[in-house]
Amino acid sequence: MAPITEDKLGRLAGCTGDPRLAAALLVDGGSGAALNLRIDYDENPVAALAALHERSKDAVYRDFLKRLPDEQDPSRY
């Protein structure tokens, strides 16, 4: 997965409403459940979203995501 930098997020934020208050990102890693990240009511939502995206790469969290139901295995628990 290509890294998502704060600069890239900043360019995208202008396409989705007021980037001064909120930012969102849908991450599809190719397998498992998609990750829907959102920051609301933040003074710098793009930087906060970039930081949240980095935290979502943590091995423990990624392992948790692999156990969630998804399109390939909706009954997984």
Image (tube, rainbow, N blue to C red):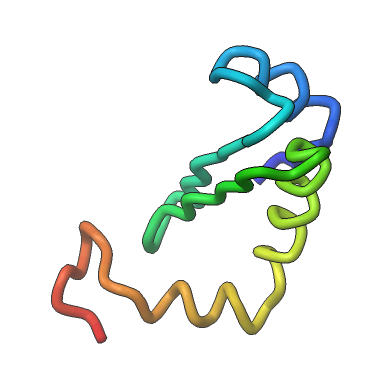
Please determine whether, in this image, residue 73 is positioned above or below residue 47: below
Kindly identify the residue that appears in the image at 59 percent across and 13 percent down. Answer: 15
Q: Which image quarter: residue 19?
A: top right
Q: Is residue 19 above or below residue 38?
A: above
Q: Position of residue 14 (x, y in %)?
A: 67, 14
Q: Quadrant of residue 8?
A: top right
Q: Position of residue 31 (x, y in %)?
A: 41, 58
Say whether residue 40 is left or right of residue 27. Answer: right
Residue 6, placed above or below residue 14: below
Quarter of the image with the C terminus is bottom left
Taking the spot 80% from the left edge, 54% from the top edge, the residue there is 51
Hey, which quadrant is residue 52 in on the image?
A: bottom right
34, 47: nearer the viewer: 47
Q: Position of residue 11 (x, y in %)?
A: 74, 17
Labels in figure, total: 0
Q: Position of residue 4 (x, y in %)?
A: 74, 38
- Between 74 and 19, the one nearer to me in the picture: 19
Q: Is residue 25 above or below residue 74?
A: above
Name the residue rendered at 47%, 50% in the picture. Answer: 36
Question: Which residue is at a point 38% across and 81% down the rendered structure image?
Answer: 67
Q: Is residue 26 left or right of residue 23?
A: left
In front here: 2 or 39?
39
Single out the residue that lies furthest toward the left: 75
Residue lying furthest top in this view?
15
